[in-house]
Image: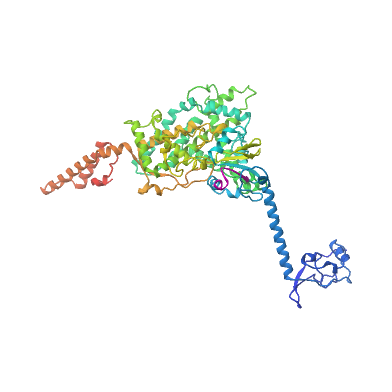
Amino acid sequence: MNRPPPRFLHCKPSSTVNTTIFELDDDGFGLDGVEHPFADLLGINLEDLDPVAIGDWIFKKPPLPPHISFPHKTCTHSNFQMLFFTVFLLFLSLVFIIIKLYSYEATTRNSPPSPPRLPLLGNLHQLGLFPHRTLQTLAQNYGPLMLLHFGKEPVLVVSSADAAREVMKTHDLVFSDRPQRKMNNVLLYGSKDLASSTYGEYWRQIRSVGVLHLLSTKRVQSFRRVREEETSRMMENIRQCCRDSLLVNLTDMCAAVTNDVACRVALGRRYRGKEGKGFQKLLLEFGELLGAVCVGDYVPWLHWVSQVSGLFQRATRLAKHLDQFIDKVIEEHVRNGRDGGVDVDSEDQNDFVDVLLSMEKNNANTTSSLIDRTAIKALILDMFVAGTDTTHTSLEWTLSELLKHPIVMHKLQDEVRSVVGNRTHVTEDDLGEMRYLKAVIKESLRFHPPIPLIVPRRCMKDIKVKGYDIGAGTQVLVNAWAIARDSSCWDQPLVFKPERFLSSSIDFKGHDFELIPFGAGRRGCPGIAFATIIVEIVLANLVHQFDWSLPGGASGEDLDMSETNGLAVHKKTPLLAVATAYGEMNRGWGLHIEGHSIMFSTALNYVTLRLLGEEVDGGEGSMQKARAWILHRGGVTHIPSWGKLGLSQ
């Protein structure tokens, strides 16, 4: 016998009282009106019902006999209100219990202070677009050592110099590991690069390669000619903008010079034109993706979010293009016979690919070496990215602060021009005498560390930091941006004041934890010297050879200093400026009086001859001839305040 389809309860208003009666439709059961079997949830007394009939109905037995019937029962609106109120209280209680369970570990252990967190997500929702700023605000409430949770992963946030010293010096070895992230595995050859590889024998070998053979003092000095040539090329491009009366896009100029230096040093040649633009585009996307937060790293069951958003598809495609580019570079070296025979310790100008391929060939029969072709590719990418993104960012922010603070700009120009004298450009030999230049760069790195949140570390075992218990596996974020603005370390931390470093020995090389834009300890950036010398030589030549101002006569207060979000924090809008060649400026003002005299004589002669009735050239033509003669005499393209002389530009 086929069972009839299930019936659903319908609510029908009673005609006798202001109540609601639950009845089953007449469906052949012979029931006029049957209450729901679970009517007790609605306040109905089930004792009045036939339990046999209810049991048969629940267990899908044949329809109830016609003689079985149930009395009508009613459920008032107050019953419903009580039901929903009870369910609501149960829901709130459940949420409260879950939150307490998630907070149990933090409240029962001697852990650092921790803000409230959400179930499953933890504190991820609090990061915002600019995590370094958000974390600074949280640290002001919870202290310089603060425990957050990204999903269920504990994250120790360090926001003071003392705490950073304990993590990166006192317990440096314990905190020398890196957390493994899916994005790093996709973009960085399975995290085989120097920056993101886990602590161990492999990391020790590639760090040795980087420190001793690629970024040693001798190697950095060997590329002096490359830096000076590319700096001169940049100055000539800016001078051409002056001749064409064009604004200078300093953002693009800084990106180009750092990219060209890095290309020649790491890859052996400059990449320009369509090929170069394509490579620069890849690098921009690389920096963007490397700084992206992948929720799936912290909440595994939300890994699908990155898939749906297309984040990993973009990363996979980008990694393929970069790998093809690096393969092409290596093939060029092999084809040109540059895949071996290079003395990796010599002071010759051998690019990084030369050195790495020679090491690969020399170590081919060495079983203890872990440096293979994949490791070489990862190191090439590491060295190139580290040599461009952070250096470009430092230059861009330093120039922005100089344009925002013209008094600092003029003071720096006075120092540089005093050291250089009558020579046309700054050389690296001059840099040692420029104390204020170094102070300006330090202050810029304090104000705008290229990577505000230093690349995360991972705790390898249980340990105490500042009296708190830190568990193994805890991720560590050092907020270099917050430390550099800590009023307990710095006088007037929100004021751009390079003079603070003229009487201070604080440096940014990892020994002074008040200023750690490049990190410190075992995991500190090994390319500090390489990046610093590029910033110094480019900046010194920019302020020596040109005078700078903002377009349209804008003041420093009008300059947009908004940031982008990512691994390295760039200026959000391009930095545009007006450049005036310093040499032309001096010669132009030197011709100012002579120009007045020539123009006055020309005008007087013209008027006198006309009064005498003589035929002469048009006055305008005479004035233009005088203008051309003055420019030729001075060897300049324009004279300051030319309009005051009566000459159009």
- Front in this rendered view, residue 525 or 117: 117
Please tell me in which quadrant of the rendered image residue 145 appears.
Answer: top right
> Which residue occupies 78% across, 64% down?
41
Report x, y in % for residue 3: 85, 63
Q: Is residue 427 visible?
A: no
Query: From the viewer's perspective, is 67 left or right of 327?
Result: right
The residue at the far front in this view is: 467
Q: How many numbered marks have been drawn onto this rendered protein structure?
A: 0
- Front in this rendered view, residue 392 or 128: 128
Please tell me in which quadrant of the rendered image residue 190 appears.
Answer: top right
Query: Which region shows up in magenta?
Result: 138-149
Report x, y in % for residue 295: 62, 46
The residue at the far left in this view is: 612
Identify the image quadrant of the N terminus.
bottom right
Report x, y in % for residue 497: 42, 41
The image's colouring method is rainbow
- Front in this rendered view, residue 162 or 482: 162
> Which residue occupies 50% across, 22% down?
346
Q: Is residue 494 visible?
A: yes
Above or below, 96 against 213 in this view is below
Identify the image quadrant of the C terminus.
top left
Report x, y in % for residue 415: 36, 34
The residue at the far bottom in this view is: 16
Query: From the viewer's perspective, is 448 left or right of 457?
Result: left
**Magenta segment: does it hold 606?**
no
Above or below, 171 against 400 in this view is above
Query: From the viewer's perspective, is 229 left or right of 179?
Result: left
